[in-house]
Amino acid sequence: MIEAFGLTKRYGAKTAVHNLSFQVRPGTVTGFLGPNGSGKSTTMRMILGLDTPTSGRVTIGGIPFRQVPNAPRHVGALLDAKAVHGGRSARQHLLCLAQLSGIPARRVDEVLGVVGLQDVARKRSNGFSLGMGQRLGIAAALLGDPQVLLFDEPVNGLDPEGILWVRNLMKQLAAEGRTVFVSSHLMSEMALTAEHLIVIGRGQLLADMSVKDFISANSADFARVRTPDTEPELREKLGSLLGEAGAQVVPEQDGALRVSGLPLPRISDLAHDADIRLWELSPHQASLEEAYMQLTQGVVDYRSTTDQRAGLQQQAPGHAPQGMGVPGQPPQGYAAPQPGPYGQPGHPGQPHPGAQGQPNPYAQGPGGAPGQGYPPPAGQGSPYGHPNPYGQPQPGPQAAAPAPMPPAAQPAAPADISEPHTEDAR
Amino acid sequence: MAAVSRVLTSEWTKIRSVRSTVWTLGIALVVTVALGALICLLASNDFGTMSPRDRIAFDPTNISFAGMGLGQLAMIVFGVLVVSNEYSTGMIRTSLAAVPQRGTFLFGKVAVAALLALVVSFVTAFLSFFVGQAMLGTHAASLGDPGVLRAVVGGGLYMTLIAVFSMGVATMLRSPMPALGILMPFFFLISNILGNVSATEKIGWYLPDQAGHKVMQVVAPAGDEVPYGPWGGFAIMLAWTVAALLCGYLLLKRRDA
């Protein structure tokens, strides 16, 4: 059991952790979530007695870490996977830690086997990948067979197989009755691993609840309703009907409606009474990722702004040769077609919604204000750089504004001398 | 006490398992002995052309340690790396999480490294002496001559303290670059300059390396006004070393790891 009481850490004028109180209970995996720079690692270091809190205290089993007798046998920690002397082999690294904690040397070989590094145990660790480093760090945490385990970002750099392994290891350790405290900035990972969540932002506690409660507290269920594409007036009709019945209706990019505040059977009844056919009526739950983003929106330290590419843009929209170029031909270079599960704007051949001149993939859609970087406007990649695994469009006004998209599938037009980007076509 | 023996075994494993240990200590030994031998050979050839004044002040023991000025730089690197490796790799957090008693950790580490440095230093000092005397031929001193054994033992102790002093400074500064950046030029240049300029000569007497050099002298140089004897000089150097370690310890104790 880890308990923090009013934990505060200041570095000069900057407050890294502010008045943090929480409990980490044995028998479950507790996820410790927060954006980068929110104070997770500082809190972990304070738990381990490495950093002294400015005020407040944190105890393990009721005792401050530095007074825990034979601490390494009770508390194991992975703080930094790279914290290994590169010239030392994995086995020597673990051996000196084992000797430091009075653990017999044969335990070193055991944990090397547990993390799957037995084959490279005698190789110098500067050749290790980040994933192997994480495994070595986890081995170090497991050395003393401790009852309390802390892991700071243990899945960073691991391959999918490694992530699955860590996830199962955490669950297994918790099932054995141990206290397992895992920090991460990946909500999706924690949703699968942890049962309990402690969320911090800018060093302050944002949430301390079970994963289940977290989702229901921070997100609303909604229904996706789709009327036949061929009869757009039905969609208008149903939208106003549902609005009158007290639902919030948000049109989605692909023509469906996102309806919240009404149970599914009621939506069906209303549609039936109005003689509107439905092509889709499906229940959805906002993902944990969305709930997390919503919660931490105000406390993200590092926001990206839209890259304006000042002076780097090869073809400014205003200078596009009007009518001479090939409408719809994508500018070359880094204009990757924007893929993704967000609707299907810009079918080949379909007239471009905002195409007065050249389509510019960098141009903001009408709804996406420049500078609004986080969360990004609909149609751009997810903030984590991978497609949102939950496959739901971002809510909000942007959803109505299809992002201009270069129809990559369109066959390239014959090269035109006046077209400025045809060097490699000739 | 269990914690002390654990730190000692663990630190022994750490120091054994990095290559820099062998490299730095090996270079310290080879450079000191080889350079000392070379300078002894040159001095032996020049002896005939020396002024009578220089002949009286000729110290065959001390001149066989002439390579130490360069060899000690490798000793400094050894001392700095032993401590700052923990910081540059981030291992310090893992170590201090395992041994929350920071004093035990630091002094255990310093003890192991100092003992290893002591062994290498004594081998270096005796080897330098014997090789050097062999080069000097007829002008050589013998270990039985008054003050000679003290000077050779002193040479071993001097090199050890240089390493330990560097460990103390590295504990204060944590990162290897500033520690080496301060220690190397200080011992190689600044201390010599201060000692050779008459205005600052008296300051130079009390610097760790110049004071420590006194213990390696058998014959005092002409016009020597230094107000302390061989062991007095050694005590000054020891005081510097203790102070550096103590400052390092206090900082380690109070600082966030």
Image: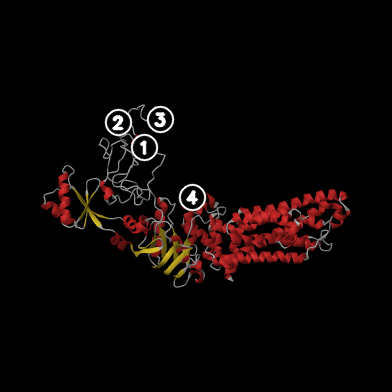
Q: Position of residue A294 (x, y in %)?
A: 32, 57
| Residue A163 in view in this figure | yes
Indicate left or right for A243 with A75 as reference.
left
Indicate left or right for A276 with A299 as reference.
left
Subunit of mark 1? A
| Residue at mark 1 to residue at mark 4: CA–CA distance | 42 Å
| Residue at mark 3 to residue at mark 1: CA–CA distance | 20 Å
Q: Where is residue B244 in the image (x, y as percent from the top left)?
A: 64, 64
Q: Which colour scheme is used?
A: secondary structure
Mark 3 or 4: the one toward you: 3
Mark 3 or 1: the one toward you: 1
Q: What quarter of the picture does the C terminus of chain A occupy?
A: top left
Mark 3 or 2: the one toward you: 2
Under mark 2, the amino acid is: Gly
Q: Mark 3 points at which residue?
A: A424
Question: Is residue A30 shown above or below A351?
Answer: below
SS at mark 4 in the image: loop
> In terms of sequence position, does the residue under pointer 2 or pointer 4 come before the other?
4
For the residue carrying disc 4, how many other residues have a C-alpha within 10 Å: few (<14), some (14-19), or many (20+)?
A: few
Under mark 4, the amino acid is: Ser
| Residue at mark 2 to residue at mark 4: CA–CA distance | 53 Å
Q: Name the residue under label 2.
A: A323
Q: Which mark is residue A129?
A: 4
Q: Which mark is residue B203?
A: none
Question: Is residue A366 shown above or below A211?
Answer: above
* Nearer the observer, A125 or A60: A60
| Residue at mark 2 to residue at mark 1: CA–CA distance | 15 Å
Q: Residue furthest front?
A: B199
SS at mark 1 in the image: loop
> In terms of sequence position, does the residue under pointer 3 or pointer 4 come before the other?
4
